[in-house]
Image (cartoon, rainbow, N blue to C red):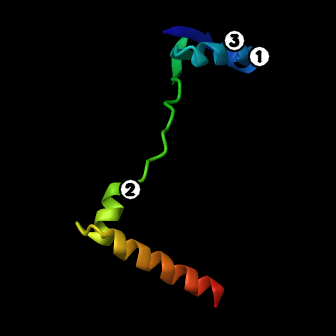
Amino acid sequence: MKTATVRDLRNDFARLSAWLENGEQVEITKGGKPFAHLVPATPRKPAKPDILKRLKKTWGTRVFSTKEVADMRAAELEGEEG
């Protein structure tokens, strides 16, 4: 763990920032005593939607035949024309 003073934090933040970007933890001291600990932030990954779960919830285990799919597409196209 790297160590820096409050003065370093104020006057030389670029150096401390570089340490954090490299994954280092930094202990900040004030008057020679530990004052705070800086740790790098952990990147947050957005949650991916569970498409298969949503499809199963909507349609269940139903499998459409080729004719049913063709009929649904024809119905959609008729709706767009009218």
Q: Residue furthest front?
A: 67
Residue 78 x, y percent position in the rendering: 56, 85
Name the secondary structure under disc 3.
helix
Q: Are marks 1 and 2 in contact (CB under 8 Å)?
A: no
Front one among 80 and 8: 80
Give the spatial CA distance, label 3 vs label 1.
10 Å
Say which residue label 2 marks: 51
Judge by depth and name the residue closer to the eye, 71 or 48.
71
The numbered mark, 3 or 2, whose residue comes first in the sequence reads: 3
User: Do the CB atoms of the residues marked 3 and 1 lie less than 8 Å apart?
Assistant: no
Q: Percent position (x, y) of residue 22?
A: 57, 13
Is any part of residue 30 visible from this angle?
Answer: no
Q: CA distance from mark 1 to mark 2?
A: 50 Å
Q: Which residue carries the number 1 mark? A: 11
Q: Nearer the viewer, mark 3 or mark 2?
A: 2
- In this view, 66 is above or below 24: below
The CA distance from mark 3 to mark 2 is 44 Å
- Residue at the (31%, 59%) spot, across then down: 53
Q: Earlier in the sequence, mark 1 or mark 2?
A: 1
Residue found at the far right of this picture:
11
